[in-house]
Image (cartoon, rainbow, N blue to C red):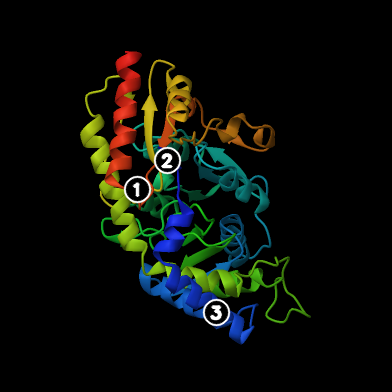
Amino acid sequence: MNIPMLDLRSEYLYMKNDIDTAIAKCLEHQSWILGPEVKEFEKKCAEFFGVKHCIGCSSGTDALVIALRAIAISSGKEFFSRDEEILTTPFTFTATGDAILRSGATPVFIDINPVDFNISIDGIDKYLKADGKKVKGILPVHLYGTPCNMDDIYEIASKYNIFIVEDVAQAFGACWKNKKLGAIGHAGAFSFFPSKNLGGFGDGGMISTNNDTFAEIATILTKHGGKDKYNVDYIGYNSRLDTLQAAILLAKIKYIDQFNNKRIGIAKKYNSELQGIEEIELPEIIDGSVFHQYTIRAKNNKRTALQGFLKEKGIASMVYYPLCLHQMKLFQERAKIHSPLTEAEKASKEVLSIPVEPLMTEQQQNYVISEIKEFFRLNG
């Protein structure tokens, strides 16, 4: 049996009629840049999240950069300065920290909560109490589709009068206490990379907000930095969401809740069947999570062996992430560390994501479970 991390072909076939019809419509009207589907998709997402504005852009990375730039511009400057700080997690994809650098600010890495892999609330609070005068904002990442504790983050941000930009790249449709992620902070940044819960057929991203001024600036920044592209106001980007991607995403968004619920069901089955294996730690089923990844911890240095065993059995797996941001060359001289980052570094050595494809059959799920059990029977 061959089980990939994600079966995009099966997903396409599942919604083929909707996607093909959407693409055919674009072929007819030939409005490839900011065509009608872009505005329609932005409106659909704003309704889905319960926010006033959604602004499409060319990638999740650009969504983060533009969101941070728009906040800087709203405060009266094009970029943050290097002595201004934004708190985030070191256990995430490179784009999170890189976006802070590209906005002009300095990232400050705070350790993670070992249970949900998200930024430590206690770590945020301690840093702000000890050295928070330069902090302008918090960039929490809802890692693996699991929501951060947004009540506590919002309370801290309000107390210190700092902004929140949510990195929702892995958590489209996820909630914190029945409120959609991306609708809680000052802005949310989404990715439509093909592997995401809602993925396009290429790169794409989106920014969500309830702030009218912020939305206007963010929109301008996606179009070279001006309302008039021949007379621009700011250093901007060529970062529009193209019509074809918007059309595909419009066709797919009607399936998002169904597919997210399937992911949750698979996660619950894994947890039920794999409990009791002492050498792995299973993720908690947190309300509102959409399981972009189902990620276990392999203890006692057994991750490499487990991953190799699964590969031999035809089961794909991935390590997200083998290296923390503060360990990368890019951030060595450009970031601050609220040390020690013990939990993040430990997680990077133990985490292993296994398939949670929404269209996995029960037979495939049972096969993954049985082979993990077999590995630990042989290597207990």
Residue drawn at x 42%, y 18% is 302
Q: Is residue 267 above or below residue 343?
A: below
288 left or right of 23 in image: left
Where residue 217 is drawn, which disc sits there?
Answer: none
Look at the image and tell me whether residue 329 can be seen.
Answer: yes
Residue 15 occupies which quadrant of the picture? bottom left
Residue type indicated by callout 2 = Ile
Q: Nearer the viewer, residue 277 or 27?
A: 27
Local packing at callout 3 (Cα closer than 10 Å; few below 14, some 14-19, many 20+) is few
Q: Is residue 271 above or below residue 196?
A: above
Q: Alpha-carbon distance for marks 1 and 3?
A: 29 Å
Residue drawn at x 51%, y 70% is 248
| Residue marked by disc 3 | 24
Q: Alpha-carbon distance for marks 1 and 2?
A: 9 Å
Residue drawn at x 59%, y 47% is 95
Residue type indicated by callout 1 = Met
Q: Is residue 101 above or below residue 331?
A: below
Q: Earlier in the sequence, mark 1 or mark 3?
A: 3
| Residue marked by disc 2 | 3
Secondary element type, mark 1: loop
Q: Is residue 52 above or below residue 15?
A: below
| Residue marked by disc 1 | 360
30 left or right of 3 in image: right
Look at the image and tell me whether residue 175 can be seen.
Answer: no
Q: Residue 99 location in percent, x, y?
A: 61, 50
Q: Earlier in the sequence, mark 3 or mark 2?
A: 2
